Image: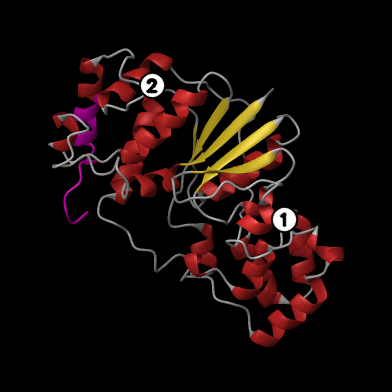
Amino acid sequence: MKVLRLFDVSAFVHAGMVNKYAHLLPPLDVLPDMFRERRIYCGGVSMLWNVLYQYWGTCDMVFCCDRRPTIKQGMYEWYKSSREHKAGVSKAKEVCEYILNDCGLPVLFQEGYEADDFIYSMVQEHKESYDKIYVYTGDSDLYFLVSDNVSIEPSSTRAKRVNMQNYTYTVRNNLFTPYNVLTFYKVLFGDKGDDIPPLEGRLAARMQEALDVPLYQKFFGDKETALSLIGMFGPDATKQGQLVYPLDVRVPTTFATGDKLRIAEWGNAFHNKYWKTGSRDSEHIERCIAEMDELGLATDDNS
């Protein structure tokens, strides 16, 4: 079976800042002094390495990253404006990308685009050439991608696994939601997590009456068709649809598999429980840590 696994790196980094893998700082003694003393956060990397241990070599893996300011922030200045940025998150993302690149793993990014844009575009480009595509993310923005061969996998213990079998009662915590209508509801009623406000009440009511019916519900998993339907209700509806649905971005057709020796070395370096018996090249890791230090990726309390 040909399998593709797509990762929202930001989701893992954020999860890694709040769970047991988190800060690599005292009093945690899970990780060695060379990380803790420099205050280099890579809890999200350790979580990614759990998945790498399970699946590396059995499938293609691609890691998708954000680059801000985004195109959507240019469309609507308050887009994701209220999100709290915990100390160290931005540097933790850079550390994660650095380590992924050092391992030769495919990392996708482009100025102005988000991980969601790359994941959406990867699914569109490759859904016919893979038997299964697994999307690792922590939010619901990409649930509309779920299909017979595309499913959502959790990036943390708090995230959800969503597939065709459980979609209708999973996406809104046991509140029945017809297949692929969640994204349309975000267009109508806004997305608090992304600071997207609801449409004006009469417009939203008119759109829901016209489109929230079985005849059209099946189309909301296809972005282009959905945006065409939404666009019939004027410029405000059009803009809202463009904010909710991900953007198209060019993506590669082939991917590197990465260097297993390097992957094992890093797994050992931050004492990931699955990689403790792997190869260890402390000199290489120490050189990388020193380079991250020079690049300013160490974190202070105010970063």
| Residue at the spot 22% in from the left edge and 17% down from the top edge | 282
Vertical placement of 277 versus 202: above or below? Answer: above
Residue 75 % position (x, y)? 55, 67
Q: Is residue 150 magenta?
A: no
Query: Would you say 231 lies left or right of 57 here?
Result: right
Foreground of the two, 273 or 204: 273
| Residue at the spot 61% in from the left edge and 61% down from the top edge | 174
Vertical placement of 162 versus 193: above or below? Answer: above
Secondary element under disc 2, as helix, strand or loop, is: helix
- Magenta residues, as a range? 288-303
Q: Amino acid at mark 1?
A: Lys
Label number found at residue 197: none
Residue farthest toward the front in the current orientation of the protein: 174
Q: Amino acid at mark 2?
A: Ile
Query: Which image quarter is the C terminus in?
Result: bottom left
Residue 240 visible to the viewer = yes
Residue 231 % position (x, y)? 75, 70
Query: Would you say 234 lies left or right of 18 here?
Result: right
Residue 294 % position (x, y)? 19, 35
| Residue at the spot 48% in from the left edge and 65% down from the top edge | 193
Q: CA distance from mark 1 to mark 2?
A: 36 Å
| Residue at the spot 72% in from the left edge and 29% down from the top edge | 131
Query: Which image quarter is the N terminus in?
Result: top right
Looking at the image, is mark 1 or mark 2 earlier in the sequence?
1
Q: Quadrant of residue 202?
A: bottom right
User: For mark 2, does the 10 Å Cα neighbourhood hold few (<14), some (14 to 19), or many (20 or more) residues?
Assistant: many
Label 1 belongs to which residue?
223
Label number found at residue 263: 2
